Image (tube, rainbow, N blue to C red):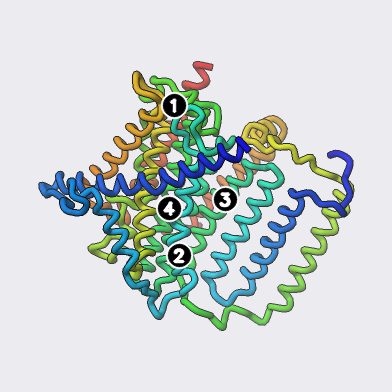
Amino acid sequence: MSEAPSYLSPTGHEIVFLLLGVVVVGTGLLVVTTRQVVHAALWLVVCLGALAGCYLVLTAEFVAWVQVLIYVGAVVVLLLFGIMLTRAPIGRSPDLDSRNRPVAAVVALATAAVLVTVVVDGFRHAYVDLSPGKGTAEEVGVAVFRYWVLPFEALSVLLLAALVGAIVISRTDIRGR
Amino acid sequence: MAEVLDLAIRLILIVAAFLVLPLVIGQTEHKVMAHMQSRLGPMYAGGFHGWAQLIADGVKFMQKEDVIPAAADRRIFAIAPAVALVPYLVVLAVIPVGPGLVGADLNVGLFFVLAVMGVGVLGSIMAGWSSGNKFSLLGGMRSAAQLVSYELPLVLATSSVAMAAGTLSLPGIVEAWEWWWLPWQAIGLAVFFIAGLAELRRPPFDMPIAESEIIMGPMTEYTGIRFALFMLAEYAGIVVLSALTTVLFLGGWHGPVLPGPVWTLIKVFALAFIVIWVRVSYPRLREDQLQKLAWVGLVPLALLQLAITGVVRVFTA
């Protein structure tokens, strides 16, 4: 965290970051407004890819490629598999919107407002030094296994519990008592 | 200026390798398969043992009519081949051929390669869905299921190498390589190569394209240049898989007498030959056998390899 330069003379990094941010927000909107289910999943690919680009601009290389590997390579593929297994018509489906549309918009805007206010309020004068080499695998590994071991282990136990739960639910030969 | 020139030369070399190597492997497949089946294969195009067969094929593909089915989702149908092909080109940029001979040395090169290769499979899922054909849809679904199951052993096997070398950079891994890694990482090598074959949907893991059953799956409706791009993606995939196996498990440019880049190429072509050999030798795995192999066979083996690597690493450190 160093002294913040003026907002009026953006550097190349900042411009690229802002453009990527615009792509993320735009494709995010397309995901929820498109009338074609599979297109929504594919817009999600672009959205998550642009987010990985944001991480790259912030020199967090490791996080960026893990984002692509896990979200684009696995989560979206699983999502597409699920859609194709159940219902994936080509063309528009008119029944994709429910009457909750205005409520959903209000909730989304309110959440965004809260998050933006908190972030702006918390980091108003913070400025991240973008010298390369701070987001390498080594740095991330040292941080995780030296300072964040407990949350890391707690998360792995949580994931294990979810895994066991998924197996119990999907197996028909295990009955509840 | 010298930097720009250096970068330009590297990019040109990578694109040249991307255009030439898949064709060489494709031609080798024609000839090797033919001889294994007591045939001659292409003999006329270009004169000497039909060396120009694939160039002639390419010209034929380009002249064909570009058909898009009426029921297809036109835009996605059109971009799917590019999504399938481009990732392999990008991956080639970070594969080291000799000491210092690499497009770009990324600090997290290993993760980059795995991440980008995962994107390539989206191409065949998109093609399968957008064709508006039930065989294609089945193929697309099988591709997705196969990718999800085989990504895990692939990542686990590569993590074992990264642990052994203590780095995620591909040139760094080759530099750290010693001959005794061959027995040490043997299980990882087998798991990586088999899972990689499955990710490329090459026989015997070609359930998603199974031409005798679902008629090439995602590619059923494709003709002309777009179909050619899918074929090119398949052979580029073989190049990338062989090169990655070479770099991660076989010591890349290490080898006696001959210069480094020659050794890399020898190893890559030996592995590509095995890929072709396996195609000719083994029958296709059924969908349930395919899933079982990944979850019951490869994942536990990869975990075992990870444990062995960890133990040896701790005792030798």
For mark 1, what is the residue?
B308
Residue under mark 1: which chain is it in? Answer: B
Answer yes or no: are tags 3 and 2 on the same subunit. no
For residue A97, side relative to residue B86 (left or right): right
Q: What element carries label 4?
A: helix
Q: Which of A111 and B75 is in front in this view?
A: B75
Residue A103 lies, in percent from the top left, at: 73, 76
In this view, B214 is above or below B256: below
Asked if the residue at tag 2 contacts the one at tag 3, i.e. Cβ–Cβ closer than 8 Å, the answer is no
Q: Do the residues labelled 4 and 2 touch (CB within 8 Å)?
A: no
Q: In this view, does B140 lie to the left or right of B35?
A: right
Residue closest to the far front = B1
Q: Name the residue under label 2.
A: B126
Residue sitting at 55 percent across and 27 percent down? Answer: B166
Of tags 4 and 2, which is closer to the observer?
2
Amino acid at the residue labelled 4: Leu
